[in-house]
Image: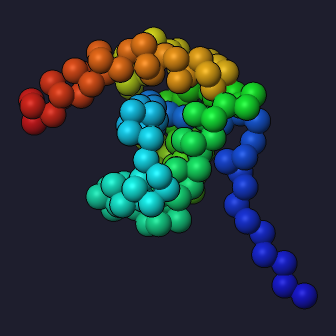
Amino acid sequence: MVIIMKDMSYQTDIIELRGHHLDMLLNYLFNRPTQKEFLEDIQQYGHGRKHNLRMYKILRRVVEGDGIKVRVVDYLDEICKGCDKYTDRCKTFKDSKEEVNVYGLNMGKVYNSDEIVEAIFKNAEKVIESLTVDESSE
């Protein structure tokens, strides 16, 4: 008998999200893509379909809420842990506090998913401006 285990770690009561993935959540919230649209758009980052599908499901779960808690972290989060490019080198990665603070959120704090969504909407204009400034300085 063969038992196939699915990776369901992203279906926990507390989802960990790092600052970079809050930016992905901003994109998801404003575009509300279908799964197909999201997967087509996100493939530009070079990750595999399995990772991108996992990201879509996690972001959708945060937006849908349903009592989900989100811990904002500066290390690898639920999305990173399913990455097809995950290596030991990734474990040393740290997000800056600015990536989180721009949303009015605090690193390490646990929020209800609706608080995360509200913070993103409230600070979207400021975040988009900061992203535009960062890109133009490259």
Q: Quadrant of the N terminus?
A: bottom right
**x 67%, y 21%: residue:** 112
Location of residue 78 with respect to 95 vertically, above or below: below
Location of residue 132 with respect to 45 vertically, above or below: above
Image coords of residue 64 (percent x, y): 63, 35
Q: Is residue 48 left or right of residue 112?
A: left
**x 55%, y 22%: residue:** 116
Tally of marks: 0
Image coords of residue 5 (percent x, y): 78, 69
* Residue placed most toward the observer, 138 or 124: 124
* Residue placed most toward the observer, 73 or 94: 73
**x 42%, y 53%: residue:** 38
Q: Is residue 94 left or right of residue 106?
A: left
Image coords of residue 77 (percent x, y): 56, 41
Image coords of residue 134 (percent x, y): 18, 28
Location of residue 20 with respect to 48 vertically, above or below: above
Q: Is residue 69 left or right of residue 47?
A: right
Query: Does residue 94 show up?
Result: no
Q: Quadrant of residue 36?
A: bottom left
Query: Does residue 17 show up?
Result: yes
**x 59%, y 50%: residue:** 57
* Residue placed most toward the observer, 3 or 25: 25
